[in-house]
Image (cartoon, helix red, strand yellow):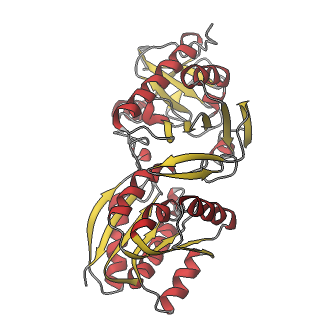
Amino acid sequence: MSRAVTAARATDLVLGRIGWARFKAGHPWIYRGQFEMPGGTPPAGPVRIVDNRGKVLGTALHSPASQIALRVLTREPATIDTAYLIAKLNDARAYRDRVMDARGARREVFSESDGLPSLVVDRYGDHLVIQVLSAGLEAMEGSLLDALNEVYRPASILARNEGSVRKLEGLERGVVQKSGTTPDRLEVMEGSHTLEVDPWKGQKTGLFLDQFENHAAAALVTKGRVLDAFSCTGGFGLAMASRATEVVAVDSSAEALEIAARNAERIGLTNFKFIESNAFDWLKNSDLANERFDVIVLDPPAFSKNKSDVEAGVRGYKEINLRAMKMLSPGGILITCSCSHHVTEELFHDVLAAAAADVHRRFRIVEKRAQGRDHPILVGFPESYYLKCFITQFLD
């Protein structure tokens, strides 16, 4: 029996001029003040959205405390219940089965890009780690858990709901076991080797799944001495090590480096050097010490988490790329990433151009990459295009 939350019974919300324009353009977010609530403020959960003539335009998740008040689910009338969620989860799973090779870890649901706004579902073998990022979806937690169990039959479901966005939604933050028992450590395959995952405390939900395909691309251009800066648990370095003479992994987290070291030992790699240090400081000091590398990877955390951070973030990206460019051997490869969606591809290119000009060196772009196919980019929703990965080469 579905735990139904029926949009037809919810208060109709009437889109205003700006809200209608956003909806018509295909953007899935409608902000507070861009619609009217003639029946009063409805509780968190699914609502119908209508135009000023009462025509039903679709359904959305309503979050009473959030500035992102409506997250569009459908562009037609629909009953939002367990059966609806099961259908959307099956669609998301079928997409990934079609475009990806089978692997032990992948993102099964990428929020708006899969028609399930504010939901993240990552699978590590038989275990699911989820994030529920809106009050509207939180109100449907029972139906969501029923749907996840129906589609995936997981051994466990762990909710990593500690993200700061939940505070903006008026929700509690924390890590909660929803079903089964999620181990402290899991092992999954990436390519031909096994990685250790910390689902309870690791970055994001345990691994940077969005970089898996970029790890493989980086390995193809690897030769000589490699620097993996902001290495976390060593995803890039581990993928590149078999083609490198040495991999130097630098990160400020001792715990992340310990996992990286165990992963390297499990694979049988002996050409790793792990350095616990602030990567900014380490790059500066190593530049001054005339360190040289044949390949450098920069995969920092997001420097620009909102629009007000963009200027400071650009300075940070320029600083680390400038240092890396100076430390490359002639003909060397710089693989540089930004996971800040506010830093557009064009702006990131401009940052690299400015850094190259300052060090009086020419670089060419070998390849532009984004997040993996299990993190698809939704047309009309630029927020879903967050990861930029440029593979570049030092010419002269």
Residue at 47% x, 78% y: name it.
319
Which of the two residues, 387 or 25, is positioned nearer the viewer here? 387
Q: Quadrant of residue 119?
A: top right
Q: Is residue 144 above or below residue 285?
A: above
Q: Is residue 214 above or below residue 377?
A: below
Residue at 63% x, 19% y: name it.
146
| Side of 368 where 20 appears, left or right | right
Query: Tag count in the figure?
Result: 0
| Side of 104 where 222 appears, left or right | left
Residue 54 appears in the rendering: yes
Quadrant of the drawing holding the C terminus: bottom left
Residue 140 appears in the rendering: no
Which of the two residues, 30 or 38, is positioned nearer the viewer here? 30
**Residue 282 x, y percent position in the rendering:** 57, 81
**Residue 229 x, y percent position in the rendering:** 51, 71
Farthest residue to the bottom: give it: 289
Q: Quadrant of residue 274?
A: bottom right
**Residue 26 x, y percent position in the rendering:** 36, 33
**Residue 186 x, y percent position in the rendering:** 64, 45
Residue at 35% x, 73% y: name it.
223
| Side of 324 where 197 appears, left or right | right
Farthest residue to the front: give it: 268
Quadrant of the drawing holding the N terminus: top right
